[in-house]
Image: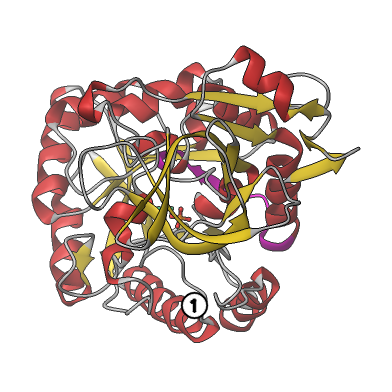
Amino acid sequence: MLNYKNNDPYIEGISLYELVQVCETPFYVYSQEKIIDQVNKTKKILGDNIFYSVKSNSNQAILRLMQSLDIGADVVSSGELKRAVDAGFDPNKIIFEGVGKSEQDLLYAMHKNIRLINTESLAEIKLLNNLAKEKNKIVDIGVRLNPDIDGETLSKISTGKKTDKFGIEIDNIDKIIELVKTCKSLNLVGISCHIGSQISKIEVYKNMFNQMKKIADKFFESGIMIKHIDLGGGFHVKYKDSDPDFNIEMVKQELDNCFAKTKYELSFEPGRYLVAEAGIIITSIITIKNNGGIDYLIVDAGMNTLIRPAMYGAHHEILAINLKSEEFIDYTIAGPICESTDIFSKNIRLAKQKIGNLLVIKNTGAYGKVMSSNYNSRPLPSEILVNNDNY
Ligand code: PLP
């Protein structure tokens, strides 16, 4: 995302040095152009039924941008629903999911007349039916299923195995069908699943598509006319060179193989894939020290700014702004937080640094700022969206 003009780093048409003048580090910077390219590519390959997973980055400017690109929104709380509505998403293009929706959440979603509420338990279906009946409404719902498919991804971001807390077990399909037939205030229009994030193996998509098609047919045959199959998100983003290559066109190929001439409307809910590579963090070096032979750069971004390395062991490439030096050193990059897991990367070779230099933490557009916190009573990081020569 960074480009160099006369040795100065730029994001689109804006100099990084200009941004540092107006914003205290650490802060996030996003490239509007990169987001637009990624959304357009995804729509071109998978079709227009894309529902942006708001949880990955719910910055209001990014939500406005997403809705201007004519995609829908996938939200998991009343807060995200409010943000999506405020950003101008047509309620008919908003899906509400989440493993634990409160009565207030369900009432709010009903009140906003959104496209559908994806239910995740038999108890939730009953509750929603009662609430809809009280309000004299017929509510369109989906059912998020747990297809018992291993996403073959990091265990901490796997969501589709039988023992995971998400969705309704597929062994319970007969119970869902029986229940839904008695719920006169609900209209079951779709099924969905999301088996995890960072899914790169095409075999996994193939199994999931086939499983979902079989399930949709089962609903249909039992007299419940499913219209949509929502196939979740989870598309893989390459965070380091050794990560597997992922090609979304292969997903499309499997989709076509499985759903040729389908009667179902197919949709996806990507988050990370649309925004991860469009974001970076700019952080300053606060101090430099050697402890036990380790060369530490202590920076002002910490696990409160970006929690993924501490929480998931996730890798983010880190670049120095000064690329040239007589000397290169293997540094460990750590944040200022009083936790020993507050480390971004170990032993990365950078040009020799000095206090006050800037570093860039790459690919932080997804699950970055949204997961930041005030831990250690530190302020939340700012966010800047760059659009050509404006920000
Ligand atoms: N849909 C649901 C239900 C999710 O839980 C998630 C993320 O956890 C997503 C979509 C988006 O996943 P990703 O950002 O990996 O595309």
Q: Residue at x 58, y 72 (%)?
A: 262
Q: Tell me if the residue at label 1 has its CB under 8 Å from ligand 1.
A: no
Residue at the spot 44% in from the left edge and 59% down from the top edge: 232
- Quarter of image, res 250: bottom right
Give the amino acid at mark 1.
Tyr
- Seen from the viewer's position, the closer of residues 390 and 112 is 390
Q: Position of residue 359 (x, y in %)?
A: 58, 41
Please name whichever residue, 155 or 98, is drawn nearer the observer in this view of the structure.
155
Mark 1, residue position: 205
Where does the image place residue 298, in percent across and percent down from the top left?
40, 41
Circle 1 — which element? helix
Q: Quadrant of the C terminus?
A: top right
Residue 371's place in the image compared with 291, above or below, is above
Does residue 271 lie above or below 145 as drawn?
above
Left or right position of 366 against 353: left
- Asked whether 230 falls inside the magenta stretch, the response is no
* Classed neighbour count for the residue bearing mark 1: other residues with Cα under 10 Å, few (<14), some (14–19), many (≥20): many
For the rendered model, the colour scheme is secondary structure
Q: Position of residue 164 (x, y in %)?
A: 19, 67
Residue 10: quadrant of the picture: top right
Where is residue 29? Give x, y as percent: 61, 32
Question: Residue shown at 22%/51% (left/top)?
Answer: 340
User: Visible in this render: residue 49?
Assistant: no
Task: Write the residue at 49% across / 52% down.
Answer: 269
**Can you see residue 371?**
yes
Q: Residue furthest right?
A: 6
Q: Nearer the viewer, residue 313 or 153?
A: 313
Q: Which residues are magenta?
A: 45-55
Above or below 337: residue 169: below
Q: In the image, ligand 1 is in what quadrant? A: bottom left
Left or right position of 21 against 153? right
